Image: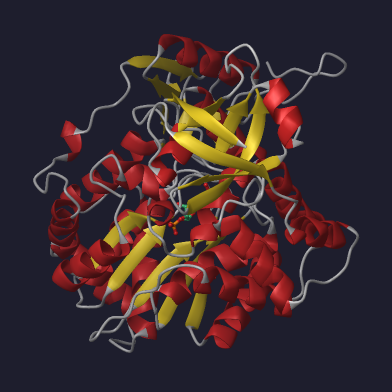
């Protein structure tokens, strides 16, 4: 059926069109079904919304995403016809019934994800099926390979390519901003792609974006890495393992990261850039993605095995994830803390030790030294990490001379003070993340939480425990309301719970 386009100037992050109810009936589709939109020999599959009041008969509402892809202007004519459900949907159902995917089936699903052929519901079902049923090792390897093969890859002509990645799950994990320049300053190549927040309040891509452009193409990543030794780019903007970001987009609202997905997500990005040596950070502890060292070890074994199958040398650092890393959570706060640490060459020991420890691991894996930590510390203390970081920021279009104090934080602030005297016995990750997200992070860069007191530190009544930062007053209020009801920093001597009233006091 031929329809005339009405451009809806909104980006919805997927291919979607709006139809009049009668036209939809004539095409034979209902809300949520797919249609193929064709124009001048090109086409995409889009999901249907019924918007009778908005869209007259003979018209089709075309959201920006489809309009851009097919270069459709206002009043442009398009051909619309129904498409049947992709086979992938049947395959996802098979997994939900507890069965194993074949190599070809996984390839089919990943291709459909990359080509935007699955609706959000179907994609969510895929993620949930993997979460509930899981995958065996062959399936994980096939999925990872399919993710690599359906995107672009990078090959470097010379140099040793290394990389690091965290499984995430611990707030404030801005270590990549310190590790990447430290590693690059030793002459290794580290073309790091990171994701945005999945379960946290700021992913490495969100944090780096405060200082530089993270939307780099594959050729820019290659060029910048060859020029200065490293980049910190957002994986979602590249065509490296493009299925990954689409999957992450449905994981984010659920705050889940199923094991097969996690393994494939991380390792596909490493495989695609041709890394030889990869360090994986596995934070464990209460409130992290894994509860203890034993579980961390299990996952580490899986990373190493997946690395072996993909021909990557993998080592894992099982790290303390039971409270936030450093004292800040939220993009601008985290960028500032990382930069300040490099400027002052001192600061939070959890941040410094972890960053240098992982950089050191990479040096040992690459065969540069047998005392990696000492080597990393020397580069850091000599100011090489900072110098390299500035070069990377500049190469990514940021201000290479930026100082940590220049970084703007949210103007709306609220300090939560301790009512008690005592020592901090816990900083609860999930509450810190929730507060930072309610305050607007990661979207509002200036939003987040500063943690004044961490575990073991002594506090007096009236002393600040956390400061909440926001860009908007109403978001600050929501965050404060939650934080008062659900204290994120627990001081010894506090009553934890009153039953039956079930409330923190
Ligand atoms: O904590 P959540 O949001 O679940 O995990 C996502 C974060 O973990 C990884 O960190 P890195 O890139 O190794 O620094 C990802 O790239 C991302 O930034
Ligand atoms: N699933 C993931 C966890 C952490 N980092 C990623 O890039 N992906």
* Visible residue check, residue 494: yes
Identify the residue at horizontal 71%, vertical 35% (top origin).
27
Residue 211: quarter of image: top left
Q: Position of residue 472 (x, y in %)?
A: 40, 14
Q: Please, which residue is most extreme toward the right here?
A: 97
User: Horizontal placement of 45 versus 72: left or right?
Assistant: right
Q: Please, which residue is most extreme toward the front here?
A: 2
User: Horizontal placement of 286 versus 241: left or right?
Assistant: right
In the foreground, 185 or 357: 185
Residue 464: quarter of image: top left
Identify the residue at horizontal 67%, vertical 73% (top origin).
140
* Visible residue check, residue 167: no
Say which quadrant the C terminus sits in. top right
Say which quadrant the N terminus sits in. top right
Count of numbered labels shown in the rendering: 0
Q: Position of residue 243 (x, y in %)?
A: 55, 59
Identify the residue at horizontal 54%, vertical 49% (top origin).
44
Q: Please, which residue is most extreme toward the left here?
A: 401
Q: Position of residue 461 (x, y in %)?
A: 49, 17
In the foreground, 166 or 350: 166
User: Horizontal placement of 491 versus 406: left or right?
Assistant: right
Q: Position of residue 175 (x, y in %)?
A: 37, 55
User: Horizontal placement of 153 versus 37: left or right?
Assistant: left
The answer to whether residue 290 is above or below residue 369 is: above
Residue 427: quarter of image: top right
In the foreground, 31 or 357: 31
In the foreground, 149 or 363: 149
């Amino acid at each position: 059926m031929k329809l005339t386009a009405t451009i809806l100037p909104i980006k919805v992050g997927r291919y979607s069109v709006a139809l009049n109810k009668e036209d939809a009936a004539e095409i034979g589709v209902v809300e949520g079904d797919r249609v193929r939109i064709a124009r001048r020999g090109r086409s995409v599959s889009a999901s249907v919304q019924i918007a009778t009041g908005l869209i007259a008969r003979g018209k089709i509402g075309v959201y920006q995403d489809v309009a851009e892809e097919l270069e459709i202007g206002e009043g442009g004519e398009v051909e619309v016809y129904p498409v049947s459900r992709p086979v992938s949907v049947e395959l996802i159902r098979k997994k939900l019934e507890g069965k194993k995917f074949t190599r070809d089936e996984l390839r089919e699903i990943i291709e459909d994800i990359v080509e935007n052929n699955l609706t959000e519901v179907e994609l969510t079902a895929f993620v949930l099926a993997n979460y509930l049923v899981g995958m065996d090792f062959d399936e994980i390897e096939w999925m990872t390979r399919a993710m690599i093969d359906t995107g672009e890859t990078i090959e470097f002509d010379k140099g040793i390519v290394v990389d690091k990645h965290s499984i995430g799950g611990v707030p404030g994990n801005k270590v990549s901003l310190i590790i990447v320049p430290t590693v690059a300053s030793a002459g290794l190549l580290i073309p790091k792609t990171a994701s945005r927040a999945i379960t946290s309040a700021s992913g490495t891509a969100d944090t780096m974006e405060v200082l530089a452009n993270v939307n780099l193409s594959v050729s820019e990543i290659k060029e910048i890495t060859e020029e200065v030794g490293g980049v910190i780019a957002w994986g979602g903007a590249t065509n490296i393992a493009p299925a990954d970001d689409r999957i992450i987009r449905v994981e984010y609202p659920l705050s889940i990261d199923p094991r097969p997905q996690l393994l494939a997500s991380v390792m596909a990005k490493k495989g695609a850039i041709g890394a030889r040596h990869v360090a994986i950070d596995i934070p464990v502890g209460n409130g992290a993605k894994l509860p203890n060292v034993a579980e961390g070890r299990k996952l580490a074994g899986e990373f190493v095995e997946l690395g072996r199958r993909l021909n990557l040398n993998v080592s894992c650092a099982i790290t303390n994830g039971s409270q936030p890393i450093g004292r800040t959570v939220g993009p601008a706060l985290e960028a500032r803390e990382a930069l300040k640490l490099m400027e002052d060459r001192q600061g939070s020991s959890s941040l410094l030790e972890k960053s240098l420890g992982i950089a050191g691991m990479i040096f040992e894996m690459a065969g540069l030294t047998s005392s990696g930590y000492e080597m990393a510390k020397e580069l850091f203390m000599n100011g090489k990490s900072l110098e390299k970081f500035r070069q990377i920021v500049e190469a990514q279009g940021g201000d290479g001379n930026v100082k940590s104090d220049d970084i703007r934080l949210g103007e709306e602030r609220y300090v939560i003070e301790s009512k008690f005297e005592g020592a901090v016995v816990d900083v609860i990750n999930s509450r810190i993340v929730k507060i930072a997200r309610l305050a607007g992070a990661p979207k509002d860069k200036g939003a987040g939480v500063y943690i004044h007191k961490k575990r073991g530190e002594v506090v007096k009544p009236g002393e600040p425990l956390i400061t909440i930062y926001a860009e908007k007053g109403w978001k600050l209020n929501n965050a404060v309301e939650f934080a008062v009801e659900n204290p994120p920093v627990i001081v010894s001597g506090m009553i934890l719970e009153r039953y039956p009233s079930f409330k923190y006091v």
